[in-house]
Amino acid sequence: MIKTKLLDKYADARAEMILLLKERGIADESVLKAMSEVERHLFIPLPLRNHAYDDAALPIGEGQTISQPYTVAIMTEELHVKELDKVLEIGTGSGYQTAILAAMGIRVFTIERLPGLLKTAKQVLESLNVRFVSKMSDGTIGWREFSPFDGILVTAGAPEIPKPLIEQLKVGGKLVIPVGSQDFQQMKIVTKVDENNRCEIIDKADFKFVPLIGKEGWHEDDSR
Ligand code: SAM
């Protein structure tokens, strides 16, 4: 016990983060367990590590962020996935969300458009022996080769729901995606109800994400 604490000086801070997530309404035990196991500080640039367990988004370079722990928790909970399910994540960023899904026993396929971020994320994930499949690409068009997915998680804000992502979901599967302007987005929980790509959509709270940039997202020259 003492040895574990010495090795993990952030253990208390992580336990406090889990308490806060419970207070904010996160109830899925598999999500809470994964978030209590994965060391968020390892996904954060060294100078900011003392803030790793604050309930805040933090910069990870290239103008991008690692999402706030509450956001990671609620999005993962809303996916309603279980061990061995196949999930596509759009926006690898730091790799933290990838590690959370993998810790839940999910088969994770993750796409990032910025090569520098993907390289760093892969190094961290591989050093932790996390199992995942990744590629550098435009995630707005999905990853047809590995579809259909049990769930799709988009960790950047979209102007609208990208059609290819609906097509690549299993019937009954959920797409969790923030949709709105570049200033704020509403979290949408999209459930595919039949093979004709009909969906039920539930709107959740407002969030603020970095933009989803790509063919079916914002374009590089869209004004902010
Ligand atoms: N899931 C990340 C984590 O745990 O750190 C958070 C990622 S950050 C909020 C959003 C990421 O989406 C950024 O790294 C950004 O480069 C990426 N992104 C934006 N548009 C994308 C696209 N079309 N395809 C793939 N990644 C994209």
Image (cartoon, rainbow, N blue to C red):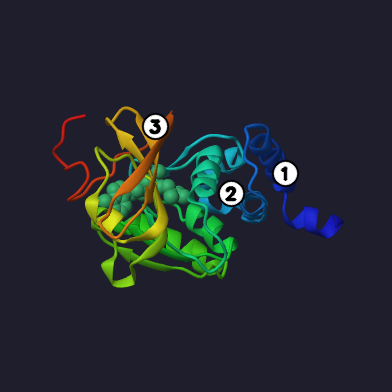
Residue appearing at x 65%, y 49% in the figure: 32
Nearest the viewer among 117 and 184 is 184
Q: What's the residue at 68%, 44% (across, down)?
A: 14
User: At x 45% / y 52%, what residue is drawn?
Assistant: 94
Residue ID for mark 2: 41
x, y percent for residue 38: 62, 55
Q: Which mark is residue 72?
A: none
Q: Which residue is mark 1?
A: 15
- Real-space Cα distance between discs 1 and 3? 26 Å
Tag 1 secondary structure:
helix
* Left or right: 15 as drawn, with respect to 127: right
Of labels 2 and 1, the one closer to you: 1
Residue type, mark 3 in image: Lys
The CB of the residue at mark 3 lies under 8 Å from ligand 1: no
Q: Position of residue 127 (x, y in %)?
A: 54, 68
* N-term-proximal mark, 2 vs 1: 1
Q: Earlier in the sequence, mark 1 or mark 3?
A: 1
Against 3, is 71 above or below?
above
Residue 43 appears at what percent x and percent y? 52, 52
Secondary structure, mark 2, is: helix
Q: Secondary structure at mark 3?
A: loop
Crowding near the residue tagged with mark 3, few <14, some 14–19, many ≥20 C-alpha atoms within 10 Å: many
